[in-house]
């Protein structure tokens, strides 16, 4: 369980970094459609990655809680 917590924390930090990077690229795209699309993709993919990692964390906590309730420690 603690390994999953560490991995989700790292994934969250990485996703936040990519969100910032995508925002910087979006601001500095200066109207260039190709750069603007790349920045939007970076932002979208980082949000998708964050949602997937949070869903995995919630699911692992749910399964762990059910296993403890069913089988005990």
Image (cartoon, rainbow, N blue to C red):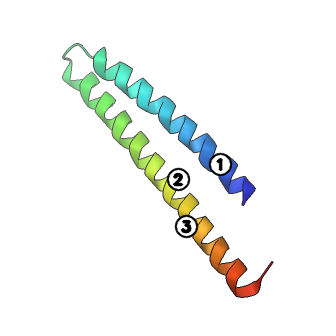
Q: Which residue is mark 1?
A: 7
- 16 lies left or right of 41: right
At label 1, counting other C-alpha atoms closer than 10 Å, the crowd grade (few under 14, some 14-19, many 20 or more) is few
**In the rendered view of the protein, which quadrant contains the N terminus?**
bottom right
Point 44% across, 52% down: residue: 51
The mark that comes first in sequence, 2 or 3, is: 2
User: Image height check: is 41 above or below 24?
Assistant: below
| Mark drawn on residue 59 | 3
Report the Cα–Cα distance between label 2 and label 3: 10 Å
Report the Cα–Cα distance between label 3 and label 1: 14 Å
| Mark drawn on residue 18 | none
Q: Position of residue 49 (x, y in %)?
A: 46, 47
At label 2, counting other C-alpha atoms closer than 10 Å, the crowd grade (few under 14, some 14-19, many 20 or more) is many
User: Image height check: is 63 above or below 32?
Assistant: below
User: Image height check: is 6 above or below 72?
Assistant: above
Are circles 1 and 2 on residues that touch, CB within 8 Å? yes
């Amino acid at each position: 369980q603690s390994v999953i917590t560490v991995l989700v924390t790292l994934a969250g930090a990485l996703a936040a970094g990519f969100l910032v990077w995508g925002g910087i690229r979006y601001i500095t795209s200066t109207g260039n459609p190709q750069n603007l699309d790349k920045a939007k993709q970076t932002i979208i993919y980082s949000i998708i990655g964050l949602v997937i990692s949070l869903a995995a964390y919630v699911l692992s906590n749910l399964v762990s809680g059910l296993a403890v309730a069913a089988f005990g420690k």
